[in-house]
Image (cartoon, rainbow, N blue to C red):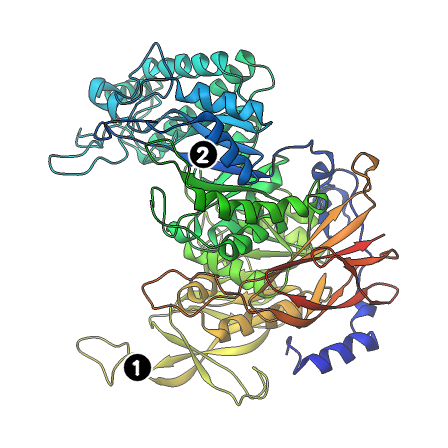
Amino acid sequence: MNKPVNRRQFLNTLGAGVVASQVVGFSACETESTNSAITGEAPGFWTDPRFGQQKRMPWCKVHLDFHNSKHIPEIGAKFDPAEWGDRILAGNLDSIVVFAKDMHGYFYYPSKFGPVHPGLSFDLLGEQVKACRERNIAVYAYYCTAWDNFLADTHPEWNMRKPDGSDYRPKPGETPGWTALCLGNRDFVDLIADHIREFVSEYELDGAWLDMAEPIVPECYCSECIRQIKDSGKDPYDREVQREHQNRNFLEFHRRMQELVHSTRPGCRIDFNDIGLSKVSERASFLDSIDIEALPTGGWGYYYAPVQIRYQRNFGIPVYGMTGRFVSSWADFGGLKLPAQLDVELASIVANAARCDVGDQMPPDGVLDKAVYHVLGKSFGRIKQILPWLEQAAPVTEAALLIPDRPLERLRESYIYGITKLLIESRLQFDVLEQSQDWERYNLVVLPDELSPDSATVERLHRFIGRGGSVIVCHHAGLIAETGQTWLNRYGLDYKGDSQFKPAYMVTEDGFAGDLPGYAYALYEGASQWTANTPANSFANLGEPLFQRSAEHYTSHRQSPFDHVTDFTALAVSGKVGLVAFPIGSSYHEKGYWIYREAFLKLVKEVLQTRLIETDAPLNTEITLTYQRANPEFNRPERYLLHLINWSPSRKTPSNTEVHEDPVAIAGIHVKLNIQGCNGPVKLVCADEKLKHQKTMNSILVTVPKVRIHEIVSFER
């Protein structure tokens, strides 16, 4: 098995150098990426050189939400600019987002366009900007775009429309939600431009932060959209035509607003909260930085940010991972995390080469909560202490997870989360990429459950495999998008449709999972039917129950028990190609069944002989690797940085979100880094002490004595 019996055996194996002889030489990739599909070079590890060229930017940002309806009678009644400014200093912030206009449509400065919030009697935005400037805090102005209750009511012609002609405003008795104004209406976008030009020109801002510009759905049947689509000669009631039209409006909005901000105040940046929409490649040139709204306890969960950060960091743009101080989600007044909870979330963000952003919401009276900024001060203070090991640090990756790249789609599918969890727990260093990106530079490519590659990607995969690249194919990823036919038949793997049983069973032989005898493991989310013929080898078979449980056929409490083995495979390998014949991503996300992880690890071991990191760390340890090139400006040597994050949760009741408030330290972690040339000193950054280590020609082995929440091992070259 991939996992050693115990730590002593693991250490002895590493010391003997059994695996070291398989290590491939590693390059720091100080030049731009080369496309191995063109050059014919073998796939390898990847370090993006653009990280080493990034200029200094803030690392500790607060997004200070401030939405106030007409039912709030007074705004900023207790606001004191000196006290407010000193409190953000106490929070160890270096940047903050404050409000120009909120989702209710109210401005927080004396706008000539209005409406200014009726409870505000002074220039709140101006006072906040001044306080930040006096304290050398970068300041950005928030502007809510397509959610504006005031404009939705005063300009109903600007609202997006459903096919039945209704809009998204609340019906009588409903609490207002996203009003969904339409970017296809030129008058509306012109007004947005006037608003942004006004506050960007009037205030000394570092950036404008635009929220909720994306369409609530990729279709709008307002009169303007109908007219524009008809004028183009297309059918406005064709959903794909609608998606194309809405995406074009979305991209044009980005282009126009970026140009506006840059021309109005040179050096001023613009951020768009695009809420995790895919196809970032289309709009990357319009983005100055990327904020990933990903409050884990606010509905996003703990695997949304890892997916999004590993995806969005690949476009050469600084990325911020946004969590929150809230126990739940936005506007959770009275909800406050402990420093240990924020520490582990921020540690995971920076370990993946992103900057920190924490959501807060200022009470209407304008007084920042002392307890909130006490917590922030501790957590951000820790980040500031390790900044020299974060600046210009680039992820070092060996694998790529491919994702759908359909415009205006949100990347929140459980099968992507599940594969992400599997990759993290497998200790693989990976990026998340669109099909059209350059994934040939990696050793391993993983195609998740429901990503059926298009024919162009299939041809690239064949060339990649032919040059020695490794591929793991999950469930329907073995089918070509345009035809639904398999592309794996040349590897001896043939698709025969989906199983009619849910659950089906994965039937193993003795020794498949450690010393366990063979067993029929439930595949709770069903399976697909694949045959494994020469040159493919099957590692487990697909099993079926006697019947599918239903009103007509049932027994006992739940699923029908295993009855017989079929001729289909559940897990197979053909050379460098591994196949999982069931939806392992969604299954692992939904059930967390350990056997799915064991099955995935078996395929990894079979198809990928070279691994960047080997360790006996427990599963709750997230391990990432980054690289910093030497830089005299930062007084920095060339080095690799191994991050270990201890996700140590307390047991909670089923209805409560998992939190990490009482970490249990892990000790005596053995890590082998299979990289050549680490001949300099090795240091524990957080503990601030030198670390003993063993070297071979191709690797270096360390024992990390203790990780409470986060430790960084620095390997100098």
Q: Identify the image quadrant of residue 426.
A: bottom right
Residue at 53 percent of width and 70 percent of height: 597
**Dot 1 crowding, Cα within 10 Å, few <14, some 14–19, many 20+:** many
Is there any visible trace of residue 320 in the rendered image?
yes
User: 461 left or right of 477?
Assistant: right
Vertical comparison of 26 with 655: above or below:
above
What amino acid type should be assigned to the residue bearing mark 2? Asn
Q: Say which residue label 2 marks.
A: 273
The span from disc 2 to disc 1 (Cα, nearest Å) is 47 Å
User: 369 left or right of 234?
Assistant: right
- Residue 213 locus on image (x, y percent): 39, 29
- Residue 182 locus on image (x, y percent): 31, 24
| Secondary element at image label 1 | loop
Residue at 32 percent of width and 32 percent of height: 364
Residue at 49 percent of width and 12 percent of height: 201
**Which quarter of the rendering shows the N terminus?**
bottom right
Q: Say which residue label 1 marks.
A: 560
Q: Identify the image quadrant of residue 232.
A: top left
Vertical comparison of 618 with 446: above or below:
below
Of the numbered discs 2 and 1, the one sitting upstream in the chain is: 2
What amino acid type should be assigned to the residue bearing mark 1? Ser
Residue at 44 percent of width and 60 percent of height: 659
